[in-house]
């Protein structure tokens, strides 16, 4: 449970109770859960595709409901071939493999995982009290900050947190490119991406050419 700008937030926990983990969670089972975390978190592409289908003007309802006309989703279509090529490029990227290595190192480190779990649970507890309107004591805050500082002082844990953020950024960037392509009907330009990110014309330092 994260609050905007929350000082008690810890990055997404692969072993949190919400995801079927907890104190009694099997570490080996958690490895698979954590890897699956990145596959199931983002529904952007599926949602965008669904919206396009629902808004389409195909005459027969049966066609768009069952995707009969969606030839580009067939395994041998150009779209799916390129999609697999993209997946292969990501999976084979040296930097990406390095990030996965840091995740694997964290999953294999009992001390790092336990420290992460404890900080996550304590942060959630403080968030819940805060949302309930209860005042947090200085002792509670100090204990949490001390636990978090200790966690971040663990190189394996700190590298994991950074790798997790980088993996999420990669996923968001790919999803954004695909989503904008489906929205615009063309490959988004650098200017398109800058504007969508709040920069460029009318949104940041690159403005001036659109009459705003």
Image: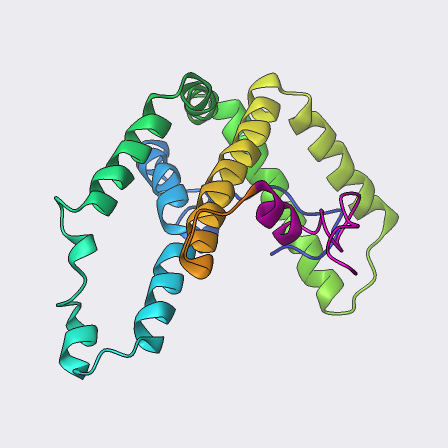
Q: Is residue 203 left or right of residue 135?
A: left
Q: Is residue 78 left or right of residue 194?
A: left
- The quadrant the N terminus occupies is bottom right
Looking at the picture, tell me which residue is in the foreground, 22 or 76: 76
* Residue shown at the point (82%, 56%) measured from the top left: 136
Query: Could you say which quadrant of the image residue 55 lies in?
Result: bottom left
Q: Estimate the x, y position of residue 20 in percent, counting from the top left.
A: 39, 51
How many marks do you count on the picture? Answer: 0
Magenta: predominant secondary structure element? loop
Q: Estimate the x, y position of residue 18 in percent, counting from the top left.
A: 46, 55
Q: Is residue 45 above or below residue 146?
A: below
Magenta residue span: 190-212
The answer to whether residue 39 is seen in the rendering is yes
Q: Is residue 100 above or below residue 69?
A: above
Residue 201 is a magenta residue: yes
- The quadrant the C terminus occupies is bottom right
Looking at the picture, tell me which residue is in the foreground, 3 or 138: 3
């Amino acid at each position: 449970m994260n609050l905007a700008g929350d000082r008690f937030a810890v990055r997404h926990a692969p072993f949190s109770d919400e995801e079927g983990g907890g104190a009694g969670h099997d570490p080996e089972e958690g490895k698979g859960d954590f890897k699956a975390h990145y596959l199931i978190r983002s529904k952007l592409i599926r949602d965008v595709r669904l919206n396009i289908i629902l808004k389409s003007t195909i005459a027969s309802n049966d066609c768009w409901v069952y995707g009969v006309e969606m030839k580009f989703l067939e395994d041998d279509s150009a779209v799916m071939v390129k999609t697999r090529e993209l997946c292969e490029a990501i999976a084979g990227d040296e930097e990406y493999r390095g990030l996965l290595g840091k995740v694997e190192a964290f999953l294999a480190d009992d001390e790092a995982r336990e420290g992460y779990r404890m900080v996550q649970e304590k942060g959630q507890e403080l968030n819940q009290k805060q949302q309930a309107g209860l005042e947090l004591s200085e002792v509670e805050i100090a204990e949490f900050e001390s636990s978090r500082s200790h966690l971040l002082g663990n190189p394996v844990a700190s590298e994991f947190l950074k790798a997790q953020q980088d993996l999420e950024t990669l996923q968001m960037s790919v999803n954004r490119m695909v989503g904008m392509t489906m929205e615009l009907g063309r490959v988004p330009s650098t200017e398109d991406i800058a504007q969508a990110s709040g920069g460029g014309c009318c949104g940041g330092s690159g403005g001036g050419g659109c009459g705003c």
